[in-house]
Every structure is written in structure tokens, then in C-alpha cells.
């Protein structure tokens, strides 16, 4: 892995991307003990609209905290995919929710029906973000599974731990499968 | 705004008897479904409004006026 | 403690405030500052402090001045539109020498502008926003950890100099999360207000003292005195005596000038042999340092000057540097505010180039690097 | 398709509002009333402050003005005085109208300028992420009331009535047809009229307060709202926890712009010329 | 000589007020009540805004705070919350409290912080030279109402009652002993109490409105004021043009600072420690 | 007409406003500006205009923007404390390009300060008082007659550039009475707003035009459009597209820079051969010219530069003069505001000396003369 | 404020039976005169309060509490 | 008369000094057609406190509009007299209301019981200012009697013209007497 690793999770408000970014950052920063910054950008005032959450993970101090050339882009909506895919590094990983993103810009992308998987295999579309986290963990290897798990437990609302761990594990599995099949 | 008529024409309203729906605006809140006195409406797979039973519809118009997103029109 | 945590700049403000002994917060929600209020609404009552959401920002500012007069360290937080509304009462706090801290998390402007995006459009307003000619202390952090530290500094400066002090964030710093290790709150250095030692009947709330800072009694502890926003004499009562007025206004304004060196906080990186200086503050300095490093990597002798205390402006530093530099690049998310100050301080003795951005995006390292290359 | 669509700025849809947000329902009421009253859209002005509700003007094809937070009524006052022929509807959130804008609300009510005001009361600051407002019930949870709100809310109709308003009504988005009528009557009223609308904010308020969806919140409205007429036949016990809707107060009072027109014709024809003019030659000011 | 003189800052006398100005009479009431209630002067705070009435704190030997125009109540709210042991009296003019400060008035009333507020209502902006205020009667003359005031005034008790206040009274400076009692009861009240005092401004208001002297204005008060008790026995005809004085409204309601104290003891002893603290080590915040 | 009259500066504002076609005034009384409102409350209804006293200054500012959107020339008047309260809505007018005029009669500060005495403490606030980075036009008269003329200019500038424009008086000019001969109102030059000529459905209220000034339709005349304080695109609707935002903000700010020369009004006296320049504005320039004449009488080559348009600041003039002068004296009733601008513009190429006064008294000719002698 | 007692002592109150007056503070508004139920008081040549007929005084105290300028004290 | 003539009318708020200054200025400026500025200074906001009204009359343009070395000082209160008499030019004229000003700083002053004259000879103390105007006119000669009379008629409230003209004429008479007796 390169010294500086940039991840951008994009979609629309309400898809839990800020939380996902935060968990990722916490996993990398607190549990994997790396340097990390997490930033975000969303629509009008505190709600609605297009949304992205960005995490920079690094072995050394992080100066510029934003993501310009992501190593990983997650796009949960077509709009987000269209807007951001161009920023992706040549060797970067693109993951799209194939249920919502129909026009996939690059053949190398991982097209995964994440939200459907969340609904069908976990039981709640709400946990799409956590499923995605699991997939990202496996496909990038930028954080450890253990760290992500602990960060999920820290951050999700009390009472939903089980559901979320399940979602995460489904994500791990899917991610692993896709990684293997490359 | 330019050419409102053109814009309206371009919208693809789905019409079932007196009920017309414009899916792109439906956010799936379920208000119309919940408060239809005749259980005419349901939410579909994709979380959007679907007309289940157009024949029960009394054209009371409640779904139209309670839809926050102007996604239903009941023909008068 | 000493355990790392992932927190945002806004949370750091709240923790810093608690660590510094802030026990009163009055505010009115506004993006991108609201998490400060939210965090404090949870934690203050647990620490014996008070949180109150007021009807607007005018009220919030007034309430913290009231609470501070009762002897309690007080704070409010807002963003541009609310900061505009606070200006009259900020002037009152300045005139009556009531310590308090105002956090302004800058968002895109003008007007309602771009509520969720960063800008640095309120820098000059921080200095000149209230009527009648006040003077200002404002600090401007570039990281979450520094946000924690500077919040404490703000409280201390307010108490030390009997002034309203501004903590100037931008949306990037406020919402960015970083890993930080916070110190134990008990060990944080706290500056207490200078209290009167005389008998109540001898107390002069606006005494002309050797250090220009009159001792401050709390309301309710026996020193009954008068506080007014009118020009007042050392006893605190209104005066229209020209000499007394002159003395008051010059002292209020002069306090900051007098202690300028004590207040000024500057951070320099790679400056020793630098030929090109990047002047940047807040989140933009993160881009700047990145650009400076890249420039160095390319063999260009660049350096960074970061005014941590953005007001008072570090005139002397700039002026001193001007002669040894080839160029200064001022990077800021506005259409040129601190560049004016840099111009004045360096006085055409060096080439000055501005890098500005007002579209709601953080200036990138590349933009600054391009400017560095342009002047090198 | 949909006669009323012509009042909308179709290219701006779908709206920014969350699924089930009540603001859109109120917007529907407004266009139905404008349509019913056959007001020329060129003469209609929608003025709002800042908030989720404040975004409404952007979707309506009238003259629309999205002002600063809390100040909608003062911009509207200026507009109306300057051009009394305009038909002005002012849309505000509860924070907008009652917190930061409280002073303008009571003064507009007192001054009695012919404006129709609507407070979309969702009991919360929706736009900024769910902080409590002066309309949040005591004990309710909000991002700045993690232990439950300590402050009692305004009883909005009482407040506005106490300020001197000439028309005060309350409705809910659930009772949509009644709401149409309340707004219509407000617009017909010569003078300052206020309609308070209870409106669900499932995201900012409901979630934190055991009402997860807009449906739950509208069901609450259905269960709790009692029209003034029905309420008058109920006893105290029955009225407990109920919310009274309908036209709660109405009276006749001189309308400000009309009074001003009267003043102008009175002083324009004054025979004697004031001292001021003798000194300054301002006797000629009418020349232009 | 004069037991009450000890409450005055004698070296500041005579006051800036015009001959016959009612503000001084209200000041007398305040010190009599403080004296009667035996409040420790070190604990008394007088807060005012800007205006002739706003000058009162300068003459009273308590903790005194002369704030910005209209904002007295917000400074007072901060003071009271920060140090609930203070006994705070807020003195405002009608412009101060009702025009620029109207929002703070209704919110203080709603929030129900234990403050005693007094509006010295002289129907005019006295300090700035006699412009009309939101309390100026319709038709009265003022420097900015050369043709008579077009705006209806607030009915102050109605406004404050409609905002949720727990104590609302009205008196006049003529009925001085009654005023003492109204202020006393306001101070005894746990919660937000408001006393509106009708007070003559012969210079700013009287002169322009056929009441040349303070005497004429006080005679007006004598003729017009009717106590609530007496009023309840009068018919509508008799009540025409009368002004009702006395305790107009009172109710029991939770007081804010006490509620807050309760909250603090509730959350301090909470067993579970929030997520926030786990993450940040804030579990230790109590250490200092 | 053409008959001499003895009127005050404040009255001159009222007459100027009427002459310029102002037909809406909303205000809140405040010393030393109240006579403007008083005069207009009498005269506006007689000329078919509206006067309204609002509940505060925030309301007054909002109301004039509302009225202006209806197509009526609108004005408010205030002093420092009220000016602080207007800042948020001034920013709104700037962002939405609604023409209007704000008169600020400066009184002693900070805070409530010295209500009946003059100062020039709000000069920098006029430029920087609102959040988010706006730009400003402000004019500053030195006589009653000029007050009348500049009031008209302000209305015209506001209409020409679609901006809020500030008329900056001080208490001396506002309350001073002088003999003036006012022109017939009918003959006064009035700049009309640029109106749309297109069809309503083609109207772009924030069109990018060649001259950077979009045509403005009145509410109610058939051009139904949207006005918002959020960043907006040419159609007037909110945008978060970085490019559109950048374009908008730079255009708004840049309008004034672009027309700087057209806007700038400078008055020079005895400058041709001057070695010592006195820079002064408002009432202080009366003392300054008196001092300059006295200096000349004593053989010192002094001159006066008076920035009639105080914002935008006449950088170029100062810069040009700097090389030919021995010294510049900046006289102002504050602790140094315009002196900073003069410093920047002249850039240490010339000696600069400040004469300041903050005790509520007008700077005297003697004080300036002393300074002239000191540097000569 | 320093030495309130000293200040009070320095004030020259004129005492007539139960009525004491402090002339420097009297602004001659005439309120006390007008509303004294017993016509005890008048305004003098210089426009300041004068006790005309101390014997009629019932010590009701009304003049004291209505004087806006604290210029009258009625001994209890 | 010198080119620039400075008058300062001082006393306390409510004594009508601003009006007096204004009438003087109007007389000199409008009716005698000279250059003139009138300025003033008073207490808190718009009312009460010490007060002064200043008039500068000149044949040429007036630059500095305030009075620094008055040629004439009118003092209606002791306080005003104490504060301002030092500014008076050596050859300046000092007029005090001897009813209120007991300590007269210079022997050459005109000590005239102006307010008593107003009360006794005109019938209203209120017109002290106008009586003073009459006296000033006579003692300084800086404006014409006719001009002052017209200015008084312009500026006093409707209905009080007769009273004020009477006051003015009493002032003229007293002034003339005093002038003669020097
Ligand atoms: C002066 C100022 N203060 C604060 C804000 C932030 N703000 C925007 S909307 C809002 C409140 C929204 O609540 P409400 O008025 O109830 O409208 P809703 O979103 O619930 O419809 C606040 C506090 C602002 N824009 N301007
Ligand atoms: C922000 C602001 N606006 C306006 C003023 C000017 N001002 C001072 S006092 C006052 C009103 C006084 O009226 P009121 O409150 O009724 O008090 P009164 O003098 O009648 O006792 C005004 C408008 C000010 N000081 N500050
Ligand atoms: S019109 Fe009435 S019956 Fe028909 S679908 Fe709508 S709500 Fe149901
Ligand atoms: S009410 Fe409207 S938005 Fe909601 S589900 Fe029905 S059609 Fe869709
Ligand atoms: S946050 Fe609440 S008020 Fe705002 S759009 Fe969502 S549901 Fe509506
Ligand atoms: S102006 Fe009126 S309120 Fe002010 S001191 Fe005089 S009489 Fe009192
Ligand atoms: S105490 Fe009563 S009777 Fe005696 S003088 Fe005073 S008012 Fe008159
Ligand atoms: S009431 Fe007081 S001030 Fe008025 S006349 Fe009587 S003693 Fe004098
Ligand atoms: Mg709301
Ligand atoms: Mg008043």
C-alpha cells in the first residue's frame, strides 16, 4: 500500500455515507493506529442532497485532508458515479451499487447490487452503508477486518449492533468473493 | 421558466383510470397509501407508489392533496 | 486519558471549552457550527454548567456577556449570518471589558451563501465588524488538535485581557475528523481573571492600572458596580468629559497593541532559507504546507507562515521577512482579505501574489504549487 | 395533466424535502387557493425565511423571495407598502417565525398590514439538523435537548392574538381540505392573517421522538386535532391532549396600507404649507 | 434622613430626567420593595436597556448593568442562569421592551426564567426625542407621526400573557402604593413576572398631545385607571376608555433555572456513560 | 426655488432623497440620525411615498430591500449600533443585487458610546461589516450642500450598479446647519435601473451580461423570478455548482472594481505643488482645509485630498501622489482606519502621520496645522 | 461609592415637622403639590417646593412616594 | 466686524438655545445674506444635560464650522459660564443671566437677569432665549434687527409669534440700554 491512501464514499444524503466514512476513519486511525482524516460534503444546511464522505489514511502526517485522486471510489448513485469517477486514480478501485448505477464508466469496476444485498441478505436496506464497508475492507485491504468491526460496534446506535455486524460480515464475504474472482 | 407546456408534455405520467402518477417525483413516503380510504394504493418493490386496485377508487382526491411531492393527480 | 480519539473540529471546540472551564454556553443553531452546541448541550449539564439555546444570535451574545459578569467563563458559537447579528453586542463586551469567547465557523458567503461549504470570508469582519472602532483578538486553527488548544487559549486570553475573543474556524476544520490525543482536562492551564483585592467601596471597575487591565469583580460578590456601554470613567459611570473618554477608548484599543507580542502566535515551516513564502491560515494552510513540501521536493525554496493569531495581525513578522524573500503568496478562501494586510506590512518590498477561491471548495495544494512555481 | 402544475416550477422538481415532509402538502394548499381565488400569478409574491419551509418559494412560479432567517415578514412589509396591489403570502418555519423572527411576527400582527402568513410548525429546526425550537413540546428530544426539552413551547395562536392580529387559524397537513379553507380565508382577510400549520418532520423530529415516519406523525394529527366547533361541545377531560384547529380568532381592524392611502390623500390636499417648505423652497416639491 | 437613601448612588443625583418624568417614581417603588423584602443589596442586579428608563440603574446602589437597546432581558437571562442566587430586576422602556426588544420579551416570558421585569411605558421613545413607539396610541402625535400615529399599540399584558408569562400586572406611577404591591408580588413570584407601568413623559409625549405637564398626565392616570377588582363590577359602557390595573394574570409554571438544576442532578448521577466519552476519554472530565 | 435656506445635513439627506426619487423609507430612530426619519415622515406621504417606522434596524433594512424589489427607490438611516444590526441584511441586498441606500450618521463609539457626539469610527465597518466578503460603495460629504448632492448620487449609484450604497455622515455634518440653495427637484439627474427588454419567460434575473449588471424587473410586473441569498445561478435559483458560484461571487465583487473609476469621486485642494498632503474626509476635512490654508499663509506647501467616495478607496490617487510628496497627514476621528488604506496605497514611499481623536470633539485646524508643521 | 454616610450628612435637608425637603434635587414638577390631599405644599418663586402649611399634613407620605426626584422625605 | 465672527450660546438642555442659535444663523445667513454655520452640542441622546449652540458668521466661505474662540459668549447657567468663559477672545463679549450665574469671571461681562426679565416683562420664562437674542443683536451688531425679527417669525411655533416678538423687543431695549451705558 502506498503511504497515502484516499477513499471517497459518495451517494446522496441519508444513505449513511458520513457514518461509513467515520467508521472507516476510526478503524484505521484508532484501531489500526494510522494517521487519518475524514471530511465530508453535503447539500443545503445539514440535510438532503448529494453527499460524499472522504477518508485519507496515511503512515505519515496528513497535510491536505481532502481527497483529490481517490484510490477507492464508492458510488451509491448514478449521479455520484458520473460526477466523481473521473477523479479516480488509474489504478484505483471503483465500487458501484449496480442496483442504482446503471451506466458504469469503466469495465474494471466492481458492480455489486449492494442495496439489494442489504435488503435481501441482511434484511434492511438501511445497512447498505455497512455492507459497503465490508466490501471496501476486503477489496482495499487498507484497514483490518478486526478494526472495522470494533469501529462499527462503537459507532452504530445501541440495539442495532447485531444487525450491523451481520451486514459487515455479508460485506466481507461478498468482497472476498469478488476479490478472488479477479 | 421556459416553455412550461413542453415540460409538462415531456413528463411521463402513468394513468390508471382517474389516477395519474408521476413516479420520478414519488419519494415513497406512503402517506397516500396509508390514508386512502379505499386501500387503492400500495408501495411497490422499489418503494414507489403503485395502483393496486383502481376500481375501488372513489376519486375522493385525498391522496392527491396529501402527497407532499405532487406525484399524484386525480382527474376531476 | 491520553487515549486517541477520532473527533471533529467542532467537537474539539466543545471539549476545549470544557477543559478551559467554560461553564456557560448560549447559542443559536447554524450550519456548520451546530455540533458545538449539540455536544455542549449534552456535556455541560453533567459538569455543572449551563447550556441554553436562545431565540437568536443577538440574544446568545447578550446572554454570554451576562453570564460572564456573574463570573462564569462563557462562550457562544455561530457562523457568518449569526456573527453579523452578534456584532452590536460584541462591541458592548469590548466596551465593558467582559471576557467571553465567540466561535465563528466560516461558511461560504456572501449572505446565506453556501451553508455547508467552507470559506474564509469573515476575516476582515472579525476585525472591523462592529461599529465605533474596536480592536480584536482572533485565533485560527488548522487541525482538530489545535482547535482544542486554541479554544483553551481563547478562554485564557479573554480572561487575561478582559475582552471578547474570537475563535475563527472554517467549515473544513470544523467538520473534519482527525485522530487526536487530548490531555487530561485537569492539567490544562487556566488563566484566572484579575480580581479586585480592595474593599468594595474602593473598587474602581475601570481603574487605570499600570497594566491597563482593571480588576474584575463578579456580580453578586459584594462589589456593587455599574456597567454601561456608554463612554464611562474609571468608576464605570457615564462621562462626557473629553479627557476621560479619550483615556478610556485609547486604553481599550491599546490593550491589544500593548500586549501584541504576548498575544501573537505564529507558526513557521521551512522558513529559515525560504525565498518564497506562502502565507495561509486555517484549512488552507494544510494545502499550503503540502504545496511547500512538494515545492521543496522540486528544489524550490518555499516556506510557510501561518498566523495562528490572525488578529492582531503579525505586521512585524511580515515586514521583517519581506526583505529576505522573493515573493509572498497569500492563499485564502475569499477575494483578498489578509492579502491587504500582507501588502501593507510588506510594502511593495516583495512581490505578492494571491491565490483565492470562493466556490466552496478548499484551495488545493496544486493551485498553491502552481503559484509558487510562477513566482520562483 | 394536472391543472395546478402550471403554478409549479417543474424543472426544479423533485423537491429537496425528505420523504413525507409536510412542507410540500402546504405548498399544494397554497396553489389550490391561489387558483380558486383566481389571483393573477404575476401579482402573487411568496416570501420565506430560511429553513426547510423556506425552500418553498423556489418551487412556485410566482414572484418569489427567499430572504434571511427570521426576516421574511419585514421584507414582505416593505413589498406590500411599496406596492399594495401585490398579493403576498409569507411562509415561515417555526424557528424562523417564532425564534429569530418572533419580533417581526408580533409587529406584523400588530401593524396589521394585509399579508397572509403561514407558519409551518414542525416543532423543530429541520434544516439545521433537529435542534429544539420555541415550538418543541416540553420533554421532547432534539439534538440540543439530549435529555428532553426544558422549555415550554409557545401557544402560537395565543401569541399572535395577543399581538393584535386580525385573523388567527390553526390546521394540520392531515386535515388538508380544512387547511385549504383556512388559508383561503386568511387571503380573503383584509389585514394580517396567520395560519399555523402542524406539519410532520419525520427526519428532524419524529425519529427522535417515537414517531419514525410521516405516517405516524399524520396519524397523531388525525387523533389529536379537534375543530373549534367540535371542541366547543367537548368537556375538559375530553379536550386533554387535544389540539384545537380552525379559525381561532378573527376581528375587524383598520388595515395599514389602506390607512396609509387615506393619510396620503389627506395630506396631499392640505392647504397650508408647512414652515419647512417656506424655508427651503420645498413648496415646489410636487413639480416632478 | 430617609432610610431609603442608602439604596441610591447619591453622588449621581439629581437625575438626568426631565421635571415630572415618571421614571424616578418607579425607581422609588423598586427600592421600597427591595427594602421591604430585605433582599441583600449585594445580590440585587438591575439590568436595563437604552432609553430614559435605561438610565435608572446608574442611580441605584446595586449591581447594575446598562446594556444595549432592547437586549436587557437576554443579559439578565445569562446572569440568572449563571448565578441563580441573584435577584434580578429588569427595567425597560416601551421602545426598548416592545419595539427592538420584543422578541426577547416574549421569549423570556415563555422560557419562564425567574426575573422581574418592569416596562416603563411612556408611550414614546423619550430618549431620542419623541418618536412614536409600539405603545403610542393610534392617532397620537410624535416627531415621526406628524399627522397622527397610524399604528395600533400593543396591549402589553395580552402580548405577554399570550407568550406564556406566569405573572402579568399593570400599574401607574400615580397609583404608587399599588405599584409597590405589584412589583413586590412580581419579585416574590418564582418565574418570569412582568409589570407594565404607565409613566408620564411630559416632554416627549405630553407636549405634543395636549398634556403639557406631568401633572396633567398623572391626572389622566387617576381618571382612567381602574383596578381589576373595581372593573369587574363595571359594565362595558363604564369601562370605555378605562385602563385596567392590578394583577391581570397569574399562574403556576415550572421555573427554568430550577428545572435546570433538576436536570443537572439527574444527569450527573447517570450510571451509563455515553458513547461520546468512551471515544474521547471524556469519562474523566469530572476529574477537575 | 433657488432660494437660500438654512438646513442641517440630516434635512439635506431627506431633501436629497426626495429629489432623487426615493419614495420609501423604513427606519428606527437613533441619535444622531433621527431628523432624517422625522423630516421624511412629514414629507413622504405628501409626495405619494411611504414612511414606516419599523420595530428595529434589522426590520428597517429588510423592509427597504422588499420595497426596492417592488421597484421603488428605498432608503433607511441609522447610526453605529443600528448599522451593526443591519449588516446581515445589507449582505443580502448585496448578494441579491437589490439597489438601496443606507445612511449611517456616525456617532462616538465603541458600543453605545457617545450618542450625541461625532466620530468616524464606522469607516472600516462600512467596508467589512457583513460576513462572507462583500464589496462596498460609500460616499462621505463635508457640507450640507454636498450631503444633498451625494444623497442623490447614492440613489443613482445604487440603481446603476444594483447595490446597497452607504452614505456615511458624521454627527457634525448631520446636525450642522448651513445656508444652501437647493436646485429644483425636477431638474435633478436620476439614473433609472436597467430594465429587462426580453419576454418574461426569457428573463434571467442574474444574467451574465457584457456590463456585469443584470437587468432588474420589479415584482408584480410579469417577470416572475426567484430571489435568494444562497449562491445562485443566472436564473436566480440556488446552485452548488462551483463554477457558477465562482462566477457569481466574482462578478458581484468585481462590479465595483470594474467601475472603480466611474464611481470614484475625489476632491483636491492646493495639490498642484503640494509637498504635504492632508488626507481627510467628512467634517474633519473642514478642519483640514482650514489648516491647509493657514499653512499656505505661513509658506508651507500643503494640500488637501478628500475622498468623497470613501469606498472604493482611491488607491491609485494616493499611490500616484506618494512619490511627489514629502508627507501625508491622515486626520480622522478614530484610532486609525483610513490611515491603514493610505499606508497600503502609498507603501512607505512617503512619511505618514496620523492625527486622531476619539473623545467626541471635532479635530481642530490647529491640531492638523501642528502636524503639518511637524512634517514640513 | 465612597462613604455614603458622609454624603448623606453633607446634604442639607430642610425639615418642617414631619416633612423634609432636599432642594437641590427638586425640579419643580409640582406633582407633590398637585396631589397632596391637604394642600400642604406649594411651589416657590424659584420654582422649587415650599412647605406652605405643615400643620395640615397628615403624614400620608404620598408626596414622598410620588416625587420622582427623591426630594421629599416624610418621617415615619 | 472681523471677517469671521463666532458666537456661542450656552446653558442647559431645554433652555431653547438650539432654537436661538438657529434663528441667529437664519437671520445672518438668509436675511442678512452672509455665510453662516450653526452647530450644537448636547447631552445624552436627544435630551437633557449641558447644551451649547454655536454660530459662525462670515463674509467668506466658512471652513471649520465650530466655535473655538467665541467673540460672544452667552451663558445661561453657572456651569456653562464656568466651562466656557476661558475660550472667549480677549475682546469678546460675555453675557450672563445674572439670575443663575452668580460667579461672573470677568468684570467686563454683561450681567443681566435675563430669565427674570423674560418672566416679569414678557410674562414667560420660556422666552428667555428670545430675550437673549435681542440683547445679543444689540450688543454685537453682527446681525440686523430686521433679520432677527424675520427669522424669529419663521421659526417659532405658530401662535406664539406675538409673545416672541415682544420678547425680542424687550431684548433689543435692554441690549441698547446696556450698550449705551458702557
Ligand atoms: C441568522 C441565522 N441564524 C441561523 C441560521 C441557521 N438556520 C437555518 S434554518 C434554521 C432553522 C430552521 O428551522 P425552522 O425555521 O423551524 O424551519 P424548518 O427547517 O424546520 O422548516 C436555522 C437555525 C441562519 N441561516 N441564519
Ligand atoms: C440599536 C439601537 N437602535 C436605536 C437606538 C436609539 N435609541 C436609544 S433609546 C431609544 C428608544 C427609547 O424609547 P424607550 O425604550 O421607550 O425609552 P424611554 O426613553 O421612552 O424611557 C432608541 C430608539 C439605540 N441606542 N440602539
Ligand atoms: S382518490 Fe381517494 S380513493 Fe382514490 S386512490 Fe386517492 S385517496 Fe384513494
Ligand atoms: S404520497 Fe406521494 S410521495 Fe408519498 S408515496 Fe404517495 S405518491 Fe409517493
Ligand atoms: S428535515 Fe424535516 S422539515 Fe426538513 S425536509 Fe426533512 S422532514 Fe422536512
Ligand atoms: S424625555 Fe420623557 S421619559 Fe425622558 S426624561 Fe424626559 S420626561 Fe422622562
Ligand atoms: S405627607 Fe401627605 S399630607 Fe403631608 S405633605 Fe405629603 S402628601 Fe401632603
Ligand atoms: S414632586 Fe419632587 S421634584 Fe416635583 S416639585 Fe415636588 S419635591 Fe420638587
Ligand atoms: Mg421547523
Ligand atoms: Mg418610552
Image (tube, coloured by chain):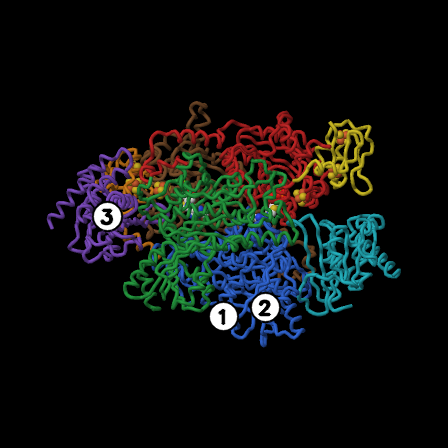
Chain colours: A purple, B orange, C green, D brown, E red, F blue, G yellow, H cyan
Q: Chain of mark 2?
A: F
- Residue H92, image quadrant: bottom right
Give the secondary structure at mark 3: loop
- Residue F361, image quadrant: bottom right
Q: Which residue is mark 1?
A: F316
Give the secondary structure at mark 1: helix
Identify the mark at residue E151; answer none if there is no mark.
none
Q: Where in the image, quadrant-wise, is ligand 7 located?
A: top right
Q: CA distance from mark 2 to mark 1?
A: 16 Å
Task: Please tell me which residue is depicted at 80% across the width and 39% down the height of the picture.
Answer: G43
- Residue E40, image quadrant: top right
Q: Please name which of the two marks, 1 or 3, marks the residue nearer to the observer.
A: 1
Q: Are marks 2 and 3 on the same chain?
A: no
Residues at marks 2 and 3 touching, judged by CB atoms closer than 8 Å? no
Vertical comparison of E272 with C240: above or below? above
Q: Residues within 10 Å of mark 2 (few under 14, many from 20)?
A: many
Left-right relation of C93 to E246 = left
Q: Chain of mark 1?
A: F
G28 and H22: which is toward the camera: G28
Residue H63 in the image: state x and y as whole percent: 66, 66
Is residue C121 shown to the viewer in this render? yes
Residue E176 in the image: state x and y as whole percent: 68, 32
Q: Which residue is mark 2?
A: F278
Q: CA distance from mark 1 to mark 3?
A: 54 Å
Vertical comparison of F113 with D130: above or below? below
Identify the mark at residue A76; answer none if there is no mark.
3
Left-right relation of H12 to C235 = right
Residue F313 in the image: state x and y as whole percent: 51, 65
Is residue D24 shown to the viewer in this render? no
Amino acid at each position: 500500500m502506498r503511504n497515502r491512501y484516499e477513499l471517497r464514499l459518495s451517494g446522496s444524503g441519508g444513505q449513511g455515507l458520513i457514518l461509513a466514512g467515520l467508521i472507516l476513519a476510526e478503524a484505521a486511525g484508532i484501531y489500526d493506529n494510522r494517521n487519518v482524516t475524514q471530511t465530508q460534503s453535503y447539500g443545503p444546511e445539514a440535510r438532503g442532497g448529494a453527499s460524499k464522505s472522504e477518508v485519507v489514511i496515511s503512515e505519515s502526517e496528513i497535510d491536505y485532508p481532502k481527497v483529490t485522486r481517490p484510490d477507492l471510489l464508492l458510488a451509491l448513485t448514478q449521479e455520484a458515479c458520473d460526477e466523481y469517477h473521473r477523479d479516480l486514480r488509474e489504478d484505483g478501485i471503483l465500487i458501484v451499487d449496480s442496483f442504482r448505477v446503471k451506466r458504469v464508466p469503466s469495465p474494471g469496476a466492481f458492480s455489486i447490487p449492494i442495496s439489494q444485498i442489504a435488503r435481501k441478505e441482511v434484511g434492511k436496506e438501511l445497512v447498505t452503508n455497512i455492507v459497503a464497508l465490508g466490501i471496501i475492507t476486503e477489496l482495499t485491504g487498507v484497514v483490518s477486518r478486526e478494526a472495522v468491526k470494533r469501529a462499527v460496534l462503537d459507532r452504530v446506535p445501541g440495539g442495532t449492533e447485531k444487525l450491523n455486524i451481520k451486514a459487515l460480515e455479508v460485506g466481507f464475504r461478498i468482497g472476498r468473493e469478488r476479490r478472488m474472482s479477479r | 421558466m421556459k416553455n412550461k407546456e413542453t415540460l409538462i408534455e415531456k413528463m411521463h405520467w402513468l394513468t390508471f383510470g382517474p389516477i395519474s402518477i408521476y413516479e420520478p417525483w414519488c419519494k415513497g413516503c406512503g402517506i397516500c397509501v396509508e390514508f386512502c380510504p379505499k386501500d387503492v394504493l400500495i408501495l411497490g418493490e422499489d418503494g414507489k407508489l403503485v395502483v393496486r386496485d383502481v376500481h375501488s377508487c372513489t376519486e375522493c382526491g385525498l391522496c392527491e392533496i396529501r402527497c407532499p411531492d405532487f406525484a399524484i393527480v386525480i382527474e376531476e | 486519558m491520553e487515549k486517541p480519539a477520532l473527533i471533529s473540529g467542532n467537537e474539539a471546540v466543545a471539549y476545549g471549552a470544557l477543559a478551559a472551564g467554560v461553564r456557560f454556553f448560549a447559542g443559536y443553531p447554524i450550519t456548520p457550527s451546530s455540533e458545538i452546541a449539540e455536544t455542549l448541550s449534552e456535556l455541560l449539564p453533567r459538569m455543572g454548567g449551563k447550556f441554553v439555546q436562545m431565540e437568536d444570535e443577538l440574544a446568545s451574545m447578550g446572554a454570554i456577556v451576562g453570564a460572564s459578569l456573574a463570573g462564569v467563563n462563557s462562550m457562544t458559537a455561530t457562523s457568518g449570518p449569526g456573527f453579523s447579528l452578534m456584532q452590536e453586542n460584541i462591541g458592548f463586551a469590548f466596551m465593558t471589558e467582559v471576557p467571553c469567547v465567540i466561535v465563528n465557523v466560516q461558511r461560504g458567503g456572501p449572505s446565506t451563501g453556501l451553508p455547508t461549504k467552507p470559506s474564509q470570508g469573515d476575516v476582515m469582519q472579525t476585525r472591523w465588524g462592529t461599529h465605533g472602532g474596536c480592536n480584536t483578538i482572533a485565533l485560527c486553527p488548522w487541525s482538530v488538535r489545535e482547535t482544542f488548544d486554541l479554544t483553551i487559549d481563547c478562554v485564557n486570553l479573554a480572561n487575561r485581557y478582559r475582552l471578547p475573543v474570537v475563535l475563527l474556524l472554517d467549515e473544513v476544520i470544523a467538520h473534519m475528523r482527525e485522530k487526536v490525543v487530548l490531555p487530561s482536562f485537569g492539567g490544562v492551564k487556566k488563566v484566572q481573571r484579575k480580581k479586585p483585592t480592595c474593599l468594595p467601596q474602593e473598587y474602581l471597575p475601570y481603574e487605570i492600572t499600570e497594566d491597563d487591565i482593571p480588576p474584575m469583580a463578579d456580580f453578586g460578590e459584594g462589589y456593587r458596580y455599574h456597567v454601561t456601554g456608554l463612554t464611562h470613567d474609571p468608576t464605570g459611570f457615564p462621562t462626557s468629559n473629553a479627557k476621560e473618554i479619550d483615556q478610556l477608548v485609547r486604553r481599550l484599543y491599546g490593550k491589544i497593541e500593548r500586549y501584541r507580542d504576548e498575544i501573537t502566535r505564529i507558526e513557521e515551516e521551512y522558513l529559515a532559507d525560504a525565498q518564497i513564502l506562502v502565507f495561509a491560515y486555517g484549512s488552507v494552510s494544510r494545502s499550503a504546507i503540502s504545496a511547500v513540501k512538494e515545492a521543496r521536493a522540486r528544489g524550490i525554496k518555499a516556506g510557510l507562515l501561518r498566523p495562528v493569531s490572525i488578529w492582531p495581525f503579525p505586521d512585524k513578522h511580515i515586514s521583517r521577512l519581506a526583505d529576505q524573500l522573493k515573493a509572498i503568496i497569500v492563499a485564502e478562501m475569499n477575494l483578498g482579505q489578509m492579502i491587504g494586510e500582507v501588502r501593507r506590512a510588506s510594502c511593495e518590498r516583495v512581490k505578492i501574489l494571491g491565490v483565492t477561491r470562493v466556490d466552496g471548495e478548499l484551495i488545493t495544494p496544486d493551485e498553491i504549487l502552481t503559484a509558487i512555481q510562477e513566482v520562483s | 395533466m394536472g391543472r395546478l402544475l402550471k403554478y409549479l416550477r417543474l424543472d426544479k422538481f423533485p423537491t429537496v424535502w425528505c420523504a413525507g415532509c409536510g412542507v410540500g402538502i402546504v405548498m399544494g394548499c397554497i396553489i389550490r387557493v391561489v387558483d380558486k381565488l383566481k389571483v393573477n400569478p404575476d401579482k402573487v409574491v411568496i416570501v420565506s425565511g430560511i429553513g426547510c419551509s423556506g425552500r418553498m418559494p423556489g418551487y412556485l412560479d410566482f414572484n418569489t423571495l427567499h430572504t434571511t432567517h427570521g426576516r421574511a415578514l419585514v421584507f414582505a412589509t416593505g413589498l406590500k407598502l411599496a406596492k399594495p396591489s401585490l398579493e403576498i403570502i409569507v411562509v415561515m418555519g417555526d424557528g424562523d417565525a417564532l425564534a429569530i423572527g418572533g419580533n417581526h411576527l408580533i409587529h406584523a400582527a400588530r401593524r396589521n398590514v394585509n399579508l397572509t402568513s403561514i407558519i409551518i410548525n414542525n416543532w423543530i429546526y429541520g434544516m439545521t439538523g433537529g435542534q429544539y425550537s420555541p415550538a418543541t413540546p416540553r420533554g421532547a428530544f432534539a439534538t440540543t435537548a439530549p435529555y428532553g426539552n426544558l422549555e415550554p413551547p409557545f401557544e402560537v395562536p395565543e401569541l399572535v392574538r395577543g399581538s393584535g392580529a386580525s385573523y388567527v387559524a390553526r390546521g394540520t397537513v392531515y386535515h388538508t381540505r380544512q387547511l385549504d379553507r383556512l388559508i383561503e380565508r386568511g387571503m380573503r382577510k383584509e389585514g394580517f392573517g396567520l395560519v399555523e400549520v402542524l406539519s410532520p418532520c419525520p427526519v428532524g423530529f419524529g425519529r427522535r421522538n417515537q414517531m419514525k415516519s410521516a405516517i405516524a406523525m399524520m396519524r397523531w394529527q388525525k387523533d389529536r386535532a379537534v375543530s373549534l366547533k367540535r371542541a366547543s361541545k367537548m368537556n375538559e377531560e375530553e379536550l386533554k391532549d387535544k389540539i384545537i384547529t380552525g379559525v381561532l380568532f378573527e376581528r375587524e381592524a383598520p388595515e395599514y396600507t389602506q390607512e396609509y392611502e387615506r393619510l396620503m390623500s389627506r395630506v396631499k390636499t392640505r392647504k397650508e404649507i408647512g414652515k419647512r417648505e417656506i424655508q427651503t423652497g420645498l413648496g415646489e416639491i410636487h413639480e416632478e
